[in-house]
Amino acid sequence: TGMFTYDPGFTSTASCDSGLTYIDGDEGILLHRGYPIDQLAEQSSFMEVAYLLLNGELPDRETLDTFKTTITRHTMVHEQLSTFYRGFRRDAHPMAIMCGVVGALSAFYHDSTDINDPVQRRIASHRLIAKMPTLAAMAYKYSSGQPFVYPRNDLSYTGNFLRMTFSVPAEEYVVDPVIEDAMDKIFILHADHEQNASTSTVRLAGSSGANPFACIAAGIACLWGPAHGGANEAALNMLREIGTVDKIPEYIARAKDKNDPFRLMGFGHRVYKNYDPRATVMQKTAKDVLEKLGVKDPIFDVAKELEQIALHDPYFIEKKLYPNVDFYSGVILSAIGFPTDMFTVLFALARTVGWVAQWNEMISDPAQKIGRPRQLYTGPTQRDYVPVDKR
Ligand code: CMC
């Protein structure tokens, strides 16, 4: 059976060429189209990063304004889509809702999506980026029993999302620039991360020529798992469960115990064997946001102390386990007012940019083929069928 390379989990297989994102896991470096993630998070905006990932270069002022206007034009969703939401149990997990409604969008954009036409692909990409905040806010509204809020196009991408999430008819939500800025940073930090599980899922689904809205729904499904995007929710639940600094050693001991399935959520990464550069920005942002909002949340102290203890523990040192992007994001999102079950939805919203950029790159690659891994067969050798009464 030596015909194929056996590589479970694809730890050493490159599935494609890509010019989008570079990661050096040993050095803890992450670049989008060559630009370091910390510079983008500190100085750029999510819309600009979206343009960069899609088009390869940073836009000039006029191009950026045109891009923002284009995205804004697509923020509404078909009124009938609200019916899909109402079909879910009211306590449905918002990620379950997102898998469904984004997949359902393929029915609304079925005929108009010729994926071999770059113009059609661009429109589909813009629609997805523009509609995700609307869909995510609607998932939140539905699960909290509040009426849906329509997009308002005079607000920024992120400001509009916050308003659709937190406004109620009785009281208009006024977007706080501190929160808007932090949210935009979080979106930038999640925008792309080369061939991670959900992105590879989108590529694999898209490699058959499938409808892009359906492909993104596949990515959302993959992202949901606790080993991937679901880790931000799991990390915050873990920090709340730990609760106080004195309980940390107990959890560290559990994480090290091979007979205990418990892992430190928000720790470790397939590619980073050093500090995840996104976690550095995230920790700083968490500190700023809590300070500026005057929020005192003991879980931030628990998180910082847990990090310090783990970073000095031989187990974590030897296995090169460092905080990843999901470790501190929950502290910020929770201070902003999001319930934990919305965390992965926010990740999906931001990662949609990476997914569509990667999908476009794949479709336009002349080497593109349907993704079709091989296997090493371990089942029975050939044998004859025996009728049921003779078994
Ligand atoms: N806590 C305790 N031990 C860990 C952890 C952890 N968080 N992560 C890895 N290990 C151990 C693991 O038990 C294994 O030990 P051994 O070699 O003795 O069997 C070793 O480290 C290597 O782990 P692995 O599972 O073989 O590594 P992987 O590359 O397959 O997994 C990972 C990477 C991110 C799934 C894993 O580190 C993990 O489960 N972390 C917690 C979940 C998490 O934070 N995920 C978010 C990842 S970043 C954002 C994203 O992708 O969405």
Image (cartoon, rainbow, N blue to C red):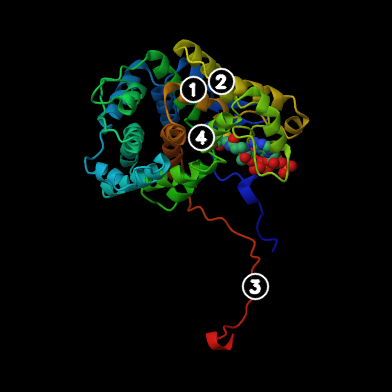
What is the distance, in whole Å, between disc 3 and disc 1 at their CAs?
Answer: 53 Å
Q: Which residue is mark 2?
A: 298
Position of residue 252 measured from the top left corner of the image (x, y, whole percent) = 70, 32
Residue 84 rendering spot, x and y as whole percentages: 28, 46
Residue 361 in picture, x, y percent from top left: 45, 39
Does ligand 1 reach within 8 Å of label 4's beta carbon?
no
Closer-to-camera residue (301/149): 301
| Picture residue at 23% right of the left edge, 25% below the top | 169
Kind of element beneath mark 3: loop
User: Is 110 placed left or right of 18 in the picture?
Assistant: left
* Residue 116 seen in render: no
Sequence order check, earlier mark of 3 and 1: 1
Label 3 sits on residue = 380
Q: Residue at x 63, y 32 (%)?
A: 267
Q: Residue furthest left?
A: 79
Please state the horizontal and vertical placement of residue 68, each as a whole percent of the image. 32, 24
Q: Nearer the viewer, residue 223 or 63?
A: 223
Q: Residues within 10 Å of mark 2 (few under 14, many from 20)?
A: some
Q: Which mark is residue 212?
A: none
Say which amino acid is labelled 3: Pro
Measure the alpha-carbon separation of dots 3 and 4: 42 Å
Horizontal placement of 25 versus 216: left or right? right
**Displayed-image quarter of ligand 1:** top right
Q: Which residue position is annotated with label 1?
A: 332
Q: CA distance from mark 2 to mark 4?
A: 17 Å
Residue occupied by mark 4: 233
| Sequence-earlier tag: 4 or 1 | 4
Q: For the residues marked 2 and 1, what is the alpha-carbon distance in whole angstroms?
A: 12 Å
Q: Earlier in the sequence, mark 2 or mark 1?
A: 2
Give the secondary structure at mark 2: helix
Query: Whole-Å distance between the Cαs marked 2 and 3?
Result: 56 Å
152 relative position to 22: left or right: left
